[in-house]
Image (cartoon, rainbow, N blue to C red):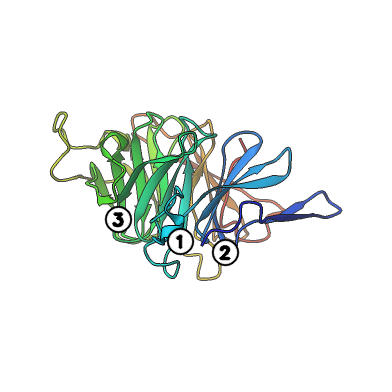
Amino acid sequence: RATNNNNSSSTKDEDDIHMFHVHGRPVCAMEWTGNDTLLTASYDGTVRKLNVERGTFEQVFATYNEDDQYASKLGYGFDTTGGRNYWMQHVCVDHRSPSDCFFASTNLGDAFHIDLRSNQRTFHHELSEKKINTLSLHPNGYSLASAGLDCTVKLWDLRKLGIFRLQAKPLAIQEAGKSVNSAFFSPSGNVLVSTTMAQHLDVTNNFHLCASKTGKKAPLTANTTKPTHRLRHDNMTGRWLSTFMARWHPSLDTLVVGSMTKPRRMDVYKEFGKDGSAAPQRVDRTGEAVTAVASRCCFHP
């Protein structure tokens, strides 16, 4: 199903805007791995890397079915549906080695980690029976949060995950009631914010510490948690707009999310208390240039 490594093209208009055609299906995620490289993932089952200086894309990973001709490929056997009902849903840069490693999730509930240095997958597990919308790695390097269509946010310990495609057990679960669009740890790791279709932004302090107290052994049952604060937020973008995903500033505990409010604006939340005693403060950002719903917002590094 993967496209050829060099099957990409670009055009440039008079305003120095470059348009790249590198994927065969919609692009589902983009993340910067550094100042001059961008990682992209697509429903076509491929992950590509843009070199900004050169203006070129390189295919770094692709999923394949179980046909023998793909047996030597890193993504061999990932796609068990023959491409009919399988796609990449999210890609997350591994901040421990951002240029060489990344996490990815699929519509089937799988999640995996790829190390391009050794050309290996370090884990591959079924974390849900439904689509996983986002993955987020805590600054400690081993606490991983997943969120998706099963209406939960789950906490995992990477040290307990292996390369076999098995069902893993989460350390903690937070029920949202409806589908969770995203869940991301703050740069400090003190706060996790999830965007839900239950019309909320759920703020949880120290989610990475919510695991059951069972010593060195994995818990038999996951610890059930609740948000520290639940902020009312209209997340019903409708079928024609991308879903809202609240995203953090790369170095500050400040986040931005789109808004359905008129006049059009973006909502910025800041002043997240370390002890969770107070709800974050919202600041509206609007102006003449904001004429439509900003479904996806992101701070530049």
Of 154 and 230, which appears nearest the observer? 154
Report the residue at 68% width, 60% height from top.
291
Identify the residue position indicated by label 3 in the image. Answer: 128
Quadrant where the C terminus lies? top right
In this image, 279 relative to 256: left or right?
Answer: left
Which callout, 3 or 1, points to the residue nearer the camera?
A: 1
Which disc is residue 292 wearing?
A: none
Picture coordinates of residue 256, whole percent (x, y) = 53, 45
Q: Secondary structure at mark 2?
A: loop
Which disc is residue 87 wearing?
A: 1
Q: CA distance from mark 2 to mark 1?
A: 10 Å
Q: Amino acid at mark 1?
A: Trp
Q: Amino acid at mark 2?
A: Arg
Identify the residue position indicated by label 2 in the image. Answer: 25
Picture coordinates of residue 273, whole percent (x, y) = 40, 31
Outermost residue, front side: 69
Q: CA distance from mark 3 to mark 2?
A: 24 Å
Report the residue at 45% width, 56% height from top.
70
Q: Secondary structure at mark 3?
A: loop
Up the image or down, 94 lies above or below 291; here it is above
In this image, 293 relative to 91: left or right?
Answer: right
The disc, 2 or 1, on the residue closer to the chain's N-terminal end is: 2
In this image, 175 relative to 242: left or right?
Answer: left
Can residue 183 be seen in the rendering of this structure?
A: no
Can residue 291 be seen in the rendering of this structure?
A: yes
Report the residue at 40% width, 60% height from top.
79
Q: Amino acid at mark 3?
A: Ser
The disc, 3 or 2, on the residue closer to the chain's N-terminal end is: 2
Could you classify mark 2 by the number of other residues whose Cα lies within 10 Å: few (under 14), some (14-19), or many (20 or more)? few
